[in-house]
Image (tube, grey):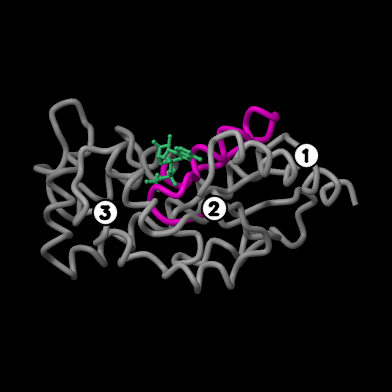
Amino acid sequence: MTDSKNSKRLIIGLTGGIGSGKTAATDLFAAQGIDIVDADIVARQVVTPGAPALESIKAEFGDEYIDAEGHLNRAKLRALVFSDESAKQKLNAIMQPAIRTELLDQLNQAKSPYVILSAPLLLENGLESYCQRVLVVDVPEALQVQRATNRDSVNEEQIKSIISSQIDRPTRLTKADDVIDNSGSLSELKIQVNQLHKKYLTLADG
Ligand code: ATP
């Protein structure tokens, strides 16, 4: 299934719960010149107007999920799959293969000495099979809730419900080859990223 084992480029899978600091961490790796493939961004790219996955969504769910400019009506689709398990499975059957293909394309096009695959659901969706190492960005749940609610206009209950839909913290940590403790300041995060960057450069060289 994966060609990562045969590929020369080192792929680091980066994950963590909502609000753990994945983007803050990947921004710091990117500042060191490292290519980032972000599963959230890819999930949006595969449904841009005219993309095959969007055409499949239109065929499966109807024209009413596409607006006049050809964009996906995310809110309407989110509401549907929230209340309809079979619609959710159909949507996943369209999205998951499209996302995987695009992720692999972007990973293959990466030019930096190693590349980071960042995905909130890296472990839940088995994307770690494309990676040689798993890097977990870890914070206590209370801090996740605090940072995510400060960032987004959502309430504590919504964040907690997303946390409970994700892999639990102890299990996530058992899958980690490396862990960033992001319970401190942004400058403490930067120190850890820079240390890992050096380590990954050495691993990529070997
Ligand atoms: P999501 O899964 O929801 O996309 P994420 O894991 O990418 O979240 P970020 O968006 O990077 O998380 O971080 C969540 C919020 O916490 C942001 O507003 C970010 O600026 C802030 N943040 C991240 N790390 C720190 C830190 N060490 N100190 C203070 N604030 C931080």
Choose the circle earlier in sequence order: 2 or 3: 2
Q: Are the residues at dot 1 and dot 2 in contact (C-beta closer than 8 Å)?
A: no
Mark 1 or mark 3, which is nearer to you?
3
Segment colored magenta: 15-40
Task: Tell me residue 193's x, y (percent).
Answer: 66, 41
Q: Which mark is residue 137?
A: 2
Distance between the Cα atoms at labels 1 and 3?
Answer: 35 Å
Q: Is mark 1 within 8 Å of ligand 1?
A: no
Taking the spot 80% from the left edge, 48% from the top edge, the residue there is 199
Query: Around disc 1, counting alpha carbons within 10 Å, would you say few (fewer than 14), some (14 to 19), or many (20 or more)?
Result: some
Q: Is mark 2 within 8 Å of ligand 1?
A: yes
Q: Does dot 1 land on a helix, a strand or a loop?
A: loop
Distance between the Cα atoms at labels 1 and 2?
Answer: 21 Å
Residue type at mark 3: give it.
Ile
Q: Which mark is residue 113?
A: 1
Q: Does dot 3 land on a helix, a strand or a loop?
A: helix
Q: Where the N terminus falls, by quadrant?
A: bottom right
Q: Which image quarter: residue 105? A: top right
Query: Around disc 3, counting alpha carbons within 10 Å, would you say few (fewer than 14), some (14 to 19), or many (20 or more)?
Result: some
Residue type at mark 2: give it.
Val
Q: Is residue 42 above or below residue 171?
A: above
Residue type at mark 1: give it.
Pro
Identify which residue, 170 or 176, lies in the foreground. Answer: 170
Ligand 1 occupies quarter: top left
Identify which residue, 136 or 40, lies in the foreground. Answer: 136
Q: Is residue 18 magenta?
A: yes
Q: Which mark is residue 159?
A: 3
Distance between the Cα atoms at labels 2 and 3?
Answer: 17 Å
Q: Is mark 3 within 8 Å of ligand 1?
A: no
Choose the circle earlier in sequence order: 1 or 2: 1
